[in-house]
Image: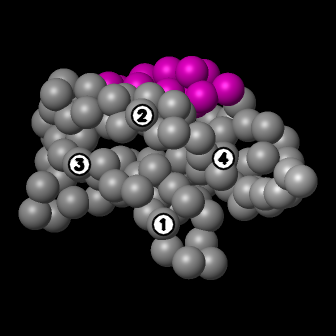
Amino acid sequence: MSEIVTLPDNFIGKEDEQRLESFGARLISRGWATRWHWNRERGIDVAFEIFTGGASERLIVSIVRNRERDAFLAKDAAGGFVAEGALERVMAVVDKLASSKGGNRSA
């Protein structure tokens, strides 16, 4: 008999996790970010967070998945909307945002 597994609404698959981690590393290599982090606190959406600023670091963006809408959602540090849609689209918008702000280069 098959077991039914219920995944959390904010589930991010392994392949998408790897793509996000690679994206975060690319932002770091370009000097637009200083680190990335998976926020997996209980009761909070699993979020991929990108930071800049070194010792006085600040959150650039947080990326979560909304299974109900079958879309990824990027929010800025204040919780404001940055992008929504397929992961490729969200990463492209975040990439443009990070490059326009200069990331760590302006810190």
Q: Which residue is mark 1?
A: 40
Q: Residue at x 40, y 56 (%)?
A: 38
Residue 71 falls in image quadrant: top right
Q: Is residue 103 magenta?
A: no
Seen in the picture, residue 41 relative to 45 is either above or below; the reply is below
Q: Secondary structure at mark 3?
A: strand
The span from disc 2 to disc 1 (Cα, nearest Å) is 16 Å
In the image as oriented, which residue stretches furthest toward the bottom? 43
Q: Secondary structure at mark 2?
A: helix
Q: Which residue is mark 2?
A: 18
Amino acid at dot 4: Arg
| First in sequence: mark 2 vs mark 1 | 2
Q: Which residue is mark 3?
A: 35
| Tag 1–tag 4 contact (CB < 8 Å) | no
The span from disc 3 to disc 1 (Cα, nearest Å) is 16 Å
Q: Which residue is mark 4?
A: 65
| Tag 3–tag 4 contact (CB < 8 Å) | no
| First in sequence: mark 3 vs mark 1 | 3
**What range is drawn magenta here?**
86-101
Is the residue marked by circle 2 packed among few (<14), some (14-19), or many (20+) residues within 10 Å? few
In the image as oriented, which residue stretches furthest toward the left? 55
Regarding residue 63, the answer to whether it shows in the image is yes
| First in sequence: mark 1 vs mark 4 | 1
| Tag 3–tag 2 contact (CB < 8 Å) | no
What secondary structure predominates along the stretch shown in magenta? Answer: helix
Is the residue marked by circle 4 packed among few (<14), some (14-19), or many (20+) residues within 10 Å? many
User: In the image, which is nearer the foreground, mark 3 or mark 1?
Assistant: 1
